[in-house]
Image (cartoon, rainbow, N blue to C red):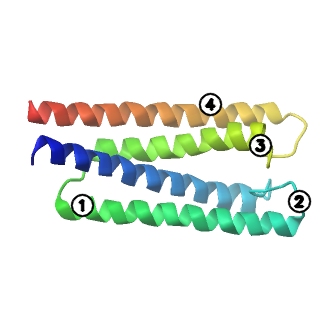
Amino acid sequence: MSKINSSVFSNRNIISGFLFGLGLIAFIDEAIFHQMLGWHHFYDRATTSVGVFSDGIFHAVSWFATVAGLFLFADIKRRGTFQFKSWLGGLLFGAGLFNLYDGTIQHKVMRIHQIRYVDNLIYYDITMIVTASVLTIAGIILILLGRNDQVEKHA
């Protein structure tokens, strides 16, 4: 495989993992925090029925991301170009970035919902943002390690 093709397939591994990680963490958020625990809806600034409808839209979009990631995964597996570190790095990066966006932009800037409606919200915010940061950084490290592996293979 040429250097250009290797780079293209490395990127496809990252994109596949990213989409799958984004969809996976959104599914976990939806299933646990929205449905099982009932802590919030995707959009909490209106009636409960609007909140439930927004959850449905959120769930559908996250499912599309998951399916797209799996289609890309099937393609790279079929071509024999699967790179575990790059894919896992993309997954962790996608999951972490989703939670960073959710915890900062949606919760604090746009204020469309909070993690949970309690007096000491700061503990939930810190836990979410620290966990999201760790996932994002771990994803970046794995992506870089995967790229280094590719460079060493072609050197």
The Cα atoms of the two marked residues, 2 and 1, are separated by 44 Å
Label 3: few (<14), some or many (≥20) within 10 Å?
few
Amino acid type at image mark 3: Met
Quadrant for residue 119, please give it: top right
Left or right of 21 on screen, residue 98 = right
Left or right of 141 on screen, residue 61 = right
Q: Nearer the viewer, residue 122 or 140?
A: 140
Q: Position of residue 71 (x, y in %)?
A: 36, 66
Q: Residue at x 87, y 54 (%)?
A: 45
The Cα atoms of the two marked residues, 4 and 1, are separated by 33 Å
The Cα atoms of the two marked residues, 3 and 1, are separated by 39 Å
**What label sits on residue 77 in the rendered view?**
1
Q: Position of residue 130 (x, y in %)?
A: 62, 30
Circle 4 — which element?
A: helix
The residue tagged 4 is: 130
The Cα atoms of the two marked residues, 2 and 3, are separated by 14 Å
| Location of the C terminus (image quadrant) | top left
Label 2: few (<14), some or many (≥20) within 10 Å?
few
Circle 1 — which element?
A: helix
Q: Earlier in the sequence, mark 4 or mark 1?
A: 1
The residue tagged 2 is: 46
Vertical side of 155 occupied by 116: above or below: below
Left or right of 131 on screen, residue 46 = right
Q: Nearer the viewer, residue 92 or 45?
A: 45
Q: Position of residue 36 (x, y in %)?
A: 73, 62
Q: Earlier in the sequence, mark 3 or mark 4?
A: 3
Q: Earlier in the sequence, mark 2 or mark 1?
A: 2
Amino acid type at image mark 4: Val
